[in-house]
C-alpha cells in the first residue's frame, strides 16, 4: 500500500479530462478590468471589490446580495466569517483589544486576500467587506491593496448614525456592539468624506436599491478609477 506521500500506481492516475484533475492557475495581484459597455453596470467584468463601512451599515447583506445577483461567477468573502474560523483561542476585540485580536484580524485579512487572488485568477469576481478606518491607512486600505492588488475597487457604505444604531441592535452574539462603540466607529468612518473614494449613503435604501447603486458606482470606478 503506498504511503501518504507516495503517488498512486499508474493504473489509478486520473485521466486529464476526469473530474478531480482540474488545473488551477496560481493567484497573482489583481489589476483593473476593462471598462464594461455603457449603461450595463459592471456587466460581465471580473473584478475585486472592497465594501467598507461601520458595523450596522449592511455591508455583509449588500455584498452577498450584489454577488448573488450578478450574471457572472462572483464570490463574497466576509472578513468576520474568516476571522471566526478560529474556534479555540478566538480573540474577541469586545473582550479587550490586544496583540492576539490584532494578529487574528491581520491573519484574516491576509487569508481573504489570498482567497480573492485565487478566485480572480480563475475567473471568479470577489467582493470583500471590512470596517476599514481612514485614519489607519497602513493596516487598512493600504493593507488590502497589498493583499489583493492595485485593481481592488473600494466603496464606502455609510448610512446615518441612527440607522446603524438600529441595525446593530438587531444583531446578536459577538457581532453586536455597544451603542458607544457604534457611534465611535461611525464618527471615524466620516473621515472617508473628502478621500476621493465613492460613498453610498444607504439610509433610505433597501438592500436591492443599495446593490444597484453599488453596481453603478463600480461601473464608474472601472471607467475612471479613484485615486487611493
Image: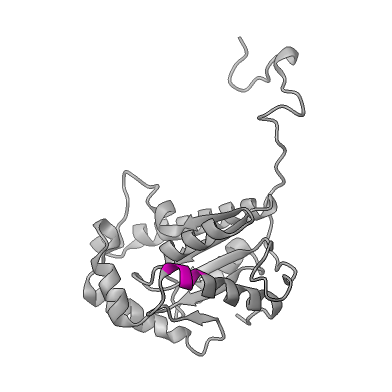
In the rendered view, tell whether residue 124 sits above or below residue 98: above
Picture quadrant where residue 125 is located: bottom right
Whole-percent x, y for residue 61 in the image: 42, 62
Front residue of 133/124: it is 124
Classified by dominant secondary structure, the portion drawn in magenta counts as helix
Front residue of 35/173: it is 35
Relative horizontal placement of residue 202, taking residue 197 as reference (left or right): left
Whole-percent x, y for residue 176 in the image: 26, 63
Relative horizontal placement of residue 32, taking residue 111 as reference (left or right): right
Front residue of 8/33: it is 33
Relative horizontal placement of residue 114, taking residue 43 as reference (left or right): left
Is residue 89 highlighted in magenta? Answer: no
Residue appearing at x 54%, y 81% in the figure: 198
In the rendered view, tell whether residue 226 sits above or below residue 74: below
Q: Which residues are magenta?
A: 207-211
Farthest residue, direction top: 1
**Residue 38 appears in the rendering:** yes
User: Quick one: quadrant of the C terminus?
Assistant: bottom right
Residue appearing at x 38%, y 82% in the figure: 188
User: Quick one: quadrant of the N terminus?
Assistant: top right
Whole-percent x, y for residue 211 in the image: 50, 69
Picture quadrant where residue 93 is located: bottom left
**Residue 138 appears in the rendering:** no
Residue appearing at x 68%, y 53% in the figure: 123
Whole-percent x, y for residue 57 in the image: 38, 72
Farthest residue, direction right: 16
In the rendered view, tell whether residue 24 sits above or below residue 147: above
Residue appearing at x 63%, y 51% in the figure: 118
Amino acid at each position: 500500500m503506498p504511503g501518504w506521500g507516495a503517488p498512486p500506481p499508474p493504473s489509478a492516475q486520473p485521466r486529464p479530462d476526469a473530474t478531480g484533475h482540474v488545473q488551477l492557475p496560481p493567484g497573482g495581484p489583481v489589476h483593473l478590468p476593462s471598462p464594461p459597455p455603457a449603461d450595463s453596470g459592471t456587466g460581465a467584468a471580473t473584478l475585486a471589490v472592497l465594501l467598507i463601512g461601520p458595523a450596522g451599515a449592511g455591508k455583509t447583506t449588500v455584498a452577498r446580495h450584489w454577488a448573488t445577483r450578478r450574471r457572472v461567477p462572483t464570490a463574497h468573502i466576509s472578513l468576520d466569517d474568516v476571522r471566526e474560523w478560529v474556534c479555540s483561542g478566538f480573540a474577541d476585540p469586545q473582550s479587550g483589544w490586544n496583540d492576539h485580536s490584532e494578529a487574528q484580524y491581520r491573519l484574516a485579512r491576509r487569508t481573504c486576500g489570498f482567497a480573492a487572488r485565487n478566485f480572480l485568477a480563475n475567473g471568479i469576481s470577489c467582493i470583500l467587506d471590512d470596517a476599514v478606518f481612514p485614519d489607519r491607512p497602513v493596516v487598512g486600505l493600504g493593507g488590502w491593496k497589498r493583499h489583493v492588488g492595485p485593481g481592488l475597487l473600494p466603496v464606502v457604505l455609510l448610512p446615518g448614525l441612527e440607522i446603524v444604531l438600529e441595525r446593530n441592535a438587531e444583531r446578536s452574539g459577538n457581532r453586536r456592539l455597544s451603542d458607544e462603540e457604534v457611534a465611535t466607529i461611525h464618527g471615524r468612518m466620516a473621515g472617508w468624506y473628502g478621500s476621493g473614494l465613492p460613498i453610498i449613503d444607504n439610509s433610505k435604501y433597501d438592500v436591492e436599491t443599495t446593490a444597484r447603486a453599488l453596481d453603478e458606482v463600480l461601473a464608474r470606478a472601472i471607467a475612471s478609477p479613484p485615486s487611493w
